[in-house]
Image (cartoon, rainbow, N blue to C red):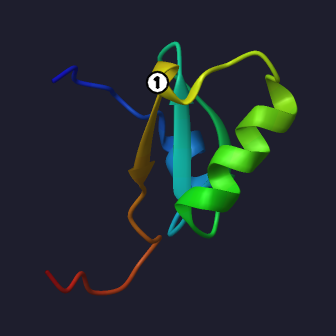
Amino acid sequence: MKKISIPKSIATKYAGRTGVIYKGKVVAGGNDTFVALKNAQKKYPKIKRSDVSVMSLPPKSGVWVL
């Protein structure tokens, strides 16, 4: 598993949302995985789903329930 550091500006922009990571950068976001992937494919039409990682970013504030 590759460790990815997320800049504070990205974490704030996509807080509480799902982010798509391509070549080590968050390239798109959405309220759920499907929307995030769709947004990424609009920006980068040639990317394959196997080339990206998807992660949920923590909300700006609040309590995490696991």
Q: Position of residue 44 (x, y in %)?
A: 79, 23
Q: Position of residue 12 (x, y in %)?
A: 57, 55
Q: Quadrant of the C terminus?
A: bottom left
Is 43 in front, or is 10?
A: 43
Q: Picture quarter containing residue 57?
A: bottom left
The correct choice, above or below, for 11 with respect to 64 in the image is above
Q: Picture quarter containing residue 6?
A: top left
Q: Please tell me which residue is depicted at 55% across the width and 39% down the height of the picture.
A: 20
Is 17 in front, or is 6?
A: 17
Q: Please tell me which residue is depicted at 84% across the width and 30% down the height of the picture.
A: 43
The correct choice, above or below, for 44 with respect to 33 in the image is above
The correct choice, above or below, for 48 with respect to 41 in the image is above
Q: Secondary structure at mark 1?
A: helix
Count the marks: 1
Q: Please tell me which residue is depicted at 24% across the width and 81% down the height of the picture.
A: 64
Q: Position of residue 35 (x, y in %)?
A: 69, 59
Q: Please tell me which residue is depicted at 22% across the width and 24% down the height of the picture.
A: 3
Q: Residues within 10 Å of mark 1 (few under 14, many from 20)?
A: few
Q: Which residue is mark 1?
A: 50
The correct choice, above or below, for 45 with respect to 58 in the image is above
Q: Position of residue 7 (x, y in %)?
A: 47, 33
Q: Amino acid at mark 1?
A: Ser
Q: Picture quarter containing residue 4?
A: top left
Image check: 47 left or right of 54? right
Q: Quadrant of the N terminus?
A: top left
Image check: 39 left or right of 7? right
